[in-house]
């Protein structure tokens, strides 16, 4: 099976006044197509920064990221955005739904950006799959946190992504709601054959993936098959 993500010698630093703070250093790993993969570590270990670099949302100070066969450092900002819209899905901790759009319209956005003619039909089908077939015309403010995250999951799969990045997808949900959202996420992922990368502090969730990468102090301390596999 071919690699969908290759990360080589990645380093990320930030300037704070006269000091340079190293957030990530000597990061090397790859992920196969259709693999489920989690990134874990204590707060401040660089998990979310790493996800952003892998998805081309930010640029490293050194090293390279190859996503879906394309080296991200060779692309302009616009080219990276086009690649993300074509190949990548996202689920965020804070949902990131557009407040002025209905659930249906939020799910349809990636499809409309691609010029899909069946955007509304496919969006309705996805909302039905996540149990929100009766919420098409509700705005985010009219939905519970769990419902908003289910809309976000439906939106993440709407453009049939090759790889989906989920950043603390249950972070703002109670335990029971979080379990339902994760079950939906994994079921849709299996059905679509998407590569799934989850950033989480929840070790129980991490063990549901095939492989777990552990970060500490901006470095990889372990990259192995999950114990539950």
Image (spheres, rainbow, N blue to C red):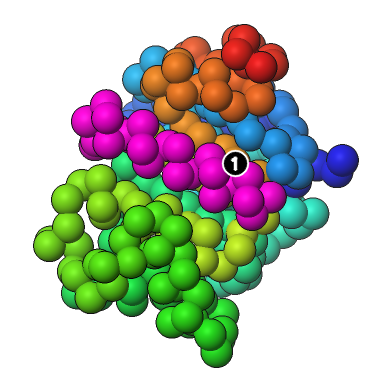
The residue nearer to you, when weighing 109 against 175, is 175
Q: Is there any visible trace of residue 169 in the rendered image?
A: no
Whether residue 164 is situated above or below residue 88 in the rendered picture: above
Q: Residue at x 33, y 76 (%)?
A: 105
Whether residue 97 is situated above or below residue 32 in the rendered picture: below
Q: Residue at x 31, y 61 (%)?
A: 132
Q: Would residue 90 be counted in the magenta stretch? A: no
Q: Residue at x 41, y 73 (%)?
A: 124
The image position of residue 37, as x and y in percent, is 61, 31
**Left or right of 64, for residue 121:** left
The residue under label 1 is 196
Q: Residues within 10 Å of mark 1 (few under 14, many from 20)?
A: many
Q: Quadrant of the C terminus?
A: top right
Q: Residue at x 65, y 23 (%)?
A: 211
Q: What secondary structure is the magenta-colored segment mainly? A: helix
Give the residues in magenta: 170-193
Whether residue 41 is situated above or below residue 150 in the rendered picture: above
The residue nearer to you, when weighing 44 against 184, is 184
Q: Would residue 177 be counted in the magenta stretch? A: yes
The residue nearer to you, when weighing 37 against 129, is 129
Residue lying farthest right?
1
The image position of residue 146, as x and y in percent, is 25, 46
């Amino acid at each position: 099976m071919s690699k969908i993500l290759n990360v080589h010698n990645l380093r990320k630093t930030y300037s704070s006044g006269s000091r340079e703070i190293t957030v990530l250093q000597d990061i090397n790993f790859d992920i196969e197509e259709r693999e489920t993969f989690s990134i874990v570590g204590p707060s401040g270990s660089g998990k979310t920064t790493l996800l952003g670099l892998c998805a081309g949302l930010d640029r490293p100070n050194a090293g390279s990221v190859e996503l879906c066969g394309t080296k991200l450092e060779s692309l302009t900002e616009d080219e990276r955005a086009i690649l993300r819209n074509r190949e990548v899905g996202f689920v965020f901790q804070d949902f990131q739904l557009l407040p002025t759009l209905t659930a249906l319209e939020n799910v349809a956005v990636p499809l409309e950006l691609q010029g899909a003619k069946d955007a509304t039909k496919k969006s309705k089908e996805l909302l039905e799959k996540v149990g929100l077939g009766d919420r098409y015309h509700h705005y985010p403010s009219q939905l519970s946190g769990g419902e908003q995250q289910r809309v976000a999951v439906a939106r993440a799969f709407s453009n049939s992504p090759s790889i989906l990045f989920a950043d603390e997808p249950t972070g703002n949900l109670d335990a029971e709601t979080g379990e339902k959202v994760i079950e939906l996420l994994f079921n849709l992922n299996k059905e679509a054959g998407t590569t799934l990368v989850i950033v989480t502090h929840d070790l129980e969730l991490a063990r549901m993936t095939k492989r777990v990468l552990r970060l500490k102090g901006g470095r990889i301390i372990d990259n192995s098959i999950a114990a539950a596999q």
